[in-house]
Every structure is written in structure tokens, then in C-alpha cells.
Image (cartoon, coloured by chain):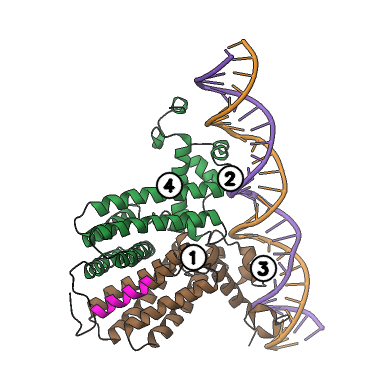
Chain colours: A brown, B green, C orange, D purple
Amino acid sequence: MKTSARQRGAAGPHGALGTRDRIVRTASRLMQRQGYDGTGIKQISQEAEATLGSVYHFFPGGKQELAVAAIRHGEKEFADELREILDGEDDPAEAVVACTRRLAEGLRASDWVDGCPVTATALGTAGRVPDVQRAAAEAFAHWRRLVFERLRRAGLAEDDAHDLAHTVISTLEGAELAAQVSQDDRPLRAAGRHLARLIDLHRPGAARS
Amino acid sequence: MKTSARQRGAAGPHGALGTRDRIVRTASRLMQRQGYDGTGIKQISQEAEATLGSVYHFFPGGKQELAVAAIRHGEKEFADELREILDGEDDPAEAVVACTRRLAEGLRASDWVDGCPVTATALGTAGRVPDVQRAAAEAFAHWRRLVFERLRRAGLAEDDAHDLAHTVISTLEGAELAAQVSQDDRPLRAAGRHLARLIDLHRPGAARS
DNA sequence: TCCCTTCTAGAACGAACGCTCTATCCAGTG
DNA sequence: CACTGGATAGAGCGTTCGTTCTAGAAGGGA
């Protein structure tokens, strides 16, 4: 362990994380709430209990490189959660409903402030920062693949699973967004019910319309 | 007409609009692409061919008041489009598919830059600017009501229409977002197919699962 | 004619922005 | 001990931010 001996108080709200990790996590959290342009490097360095020098030491590419790292961090975090929930239920439809519940819990617990960690960062930079947009696209693709594999494991046909994975991710994102803006979890609950019904419709042996 | 005689060249890309209208439209368009924090008052005034004095004359509340006006403008614009599309098809499921097609066309035409006019503005200010968030929530509610009324007109039960309106708006928003980030209209096409199937399921006389 | 309101015009302010730069600290190596 | 290189520290750069302020220009009513 190279840097741990150098932690000053070792306390603070950041545990025993290295400086780089603290910066990335703080950047991810702040950009999730305030977007790319709304989050300053100095604010990140302060809340991460790092200094400006450290930020530019670890991210010579500046704010853009930091934003990419923040998006990738958010992507992995949500991917882990998604995997856990999807694998925690026997029925794929119930698993998706559990996802909507988890998203609603997270939103409510943060007073409707912490939405999708990728959306807010990516949306404010639409096209202006190609690296950020590419990282965001990869995040969506990754999450979609997790849903796709879960649906395949439940026996759905490849084409059906592929299309449904698209709609599951889109609807989760949109419902989380609508819930956040409306400060109301009804969009997420409706999304859960409807996605479950869509998945059931494509289960092997289910009645096709 | 009070101000029209005062238009300078009357030319420019803004037609014969009044100064206030030019400012609102420009603000809406810029915030749609760059978000709230990414869009400066000076940029708005320049692109609107107005001056800072004019901006603060019409919007004494400053950037926040201007953002609220921009969101309301975007809301009305999309509401008109939505109403037109929903009324343009006999079948409600086909109408929703037409919506996804229109969204895809708009995105592609702008090189995947112009997404939802409300989302980008509202997301960057999550909770920080209550007026903006309230305006965004009203926009979503308004669009949802349009879908709800269309579904009711097609004979759906009130509860079904209510829940479906939620999911239609959420999924349209999410799929537009995913399409924009991925620069690919597949999310919107999948969303259209699945939403249509959901609506068909709830048509009066349709087989219930 | 003069005044008043409405609207246009842009200089100027303090604050914050992203970023660069130099200086310092410390563990490891010889 | 001196030297090295990763990491920390923050003053300061030029620019832009949102906002304020004063001045002027264009009709309408007296």
C-alpha cells in the first residue's frame, strides 16, 4: 500500500480511500446532482478533501478527463447494483419491478436529488465533449447488456431479449427522470408494472397477442 | 402592434418576432442543448440579437426567470406537436409509434443534439432552483394529460389510461435520452413497438393476460 | 413643445471559472 | 547523507459569469 501511510487524519467521511478515489467519487456524486457545467473543479477538490494540485496530478486532462472517470465510476456502481437485483429474483419480470423499487428508494432517500449518475453529466455536454458522450453511451450499452443476458437466461428469444433490453433501460431511465422532476415515485411504479407485463408477454410458452 | 415598428433590420434569422420572444426562443434552444449552467445570459442575448439590457428588462428575475420562461416555451411547443400527432392517427397505439418516429426524426435532424427541451434544463438544476423544477414538473404533467385524454378517447379505462400515460411519457423521455446519448434511434424504435403493444393490451375487448 | 413610459445599449463590478505554475513534503534508493 | 519521483499545497493567471447601472432612443399624450 503506497499512499495509505500518507493519509493525514485518516478520518473524514471518506474512510481509508486513496486521494484519487476520493476525487472520482466526489466528482461523480456532484456531477450527478449539478451536471457537468454546474460542478467546479475547486468544489470537487474541497469536498473530496484534496487540493487542486492533486486533482490535476491525477487527471492531467483536466475537467473532461475527470468527468469521464466520474461517469465510468457511476456506471460500475449502478451495474453492480443492477446485477445484484437481477440475480436476486427468480422471475425476470419481478426482477425488473425490483429495479424500479430500488430506484424509487434511492431517489426518495436523497430527497429526489440523486438521479442517474450518467444522465446529468452527459446531457449537459451533448456533443461538446466527445469523450464524455462516448463514456455515457458505453454505460447505457453495458447496463443494456446486463438486462439482455438476464432475459436470455430466462429463456427469451434473442431478438425479443435484445429489443426488450432497450426498452427496459430506456423506461427505467425515463421513469427515474420523471420521478425526480415530479418528486413522486408513481412514474417508477407504473413503469415497473408495465415492463413486467411486457416481459411476461415474451416468456417462452406465454400467450402471444 | 406596439413594438414591431421598432424592429431594426427586421431581417436576421428571427423573422418579425418581438425582442422578448426572440430571447425566450433562443434561451429555450440553447438550454436544450447546453443545460442551465452551460448557457450564459450573454450568449443568449447575442444569439437572440438582443442586448443585456433587454434581457434584464423583460426578465428582472434574471437567469432563473428566463429559464422558467424557456421551459414553458418548450413545453408548449412539444405539447402542440404531441397533440397534432396523437390526433393524426385513428389508432392510439399507432399514434404513439408516430411520436417515437417524430422524436427520432428531430434528433437525427439536429445531429443528436436537440433532445427534450425540458430535461436538460431541469436536470442540471435538480432542487437548486425550485421555480425551474416546478415548471418542469408541470410540463411533464401537461404532456401526460394529453396522452391520458387520447387513451380515454380510445376507450381505455380511467385507471389503465392513467398508468399508461405515465409509462408512455416516461418511456418516450427515456428512449429519446438513450437515443441521443447513443446517437442511434434503436431505443426509440423499440420503445414505439413496446408501447404500442402495451396500449393494445388495454384496448376495450382485448384479451387480458 | 415637453414629459413619461417603454425599450435598447453596453460599460463595469465582484465573484467564480478552468487551469498553470512553483514550492514543499515524504518514502524509497544508493 | 543526497537524490529522485510521486503526491500535496495553494497563489495567481486570464477569462467568463450573472448582475447592476447609467445613458440614450422611440412613440403617445399634454
From the viewer's perspective, is residue B86 above or below residue A53? Answer: above
- Respond whether the residues carrying marks 1 and 2 are from the same subunit: no
Mark 4 or 3: in front is: 4
* SS for callout 2: loop
Q: CA distance from mark 1 to mark 2?
A: 25 Å
Q: Disc 2: which chain?
A: B
Q: Earlier in the sequence, mark 2 or mark 4?
A: 2
From the viewer's perspective, is residue A163 above or below residue B134? Answer: below
Q: Which mark is residue B61?
A: 2
Do tag 4 and tag 3 residues touch (Cβ < 8 Å)?
no
Q: Disc 1: which chain?
A: A
* SS for callout 1: loop
From the viewer's perspective, is residue A48 above or below residue B152? Answer: below
Q: Which mark is residue A46?
A: 3
Circle 1 sits on which residue? A183
Q: Amino acid at mark 4?
A: His
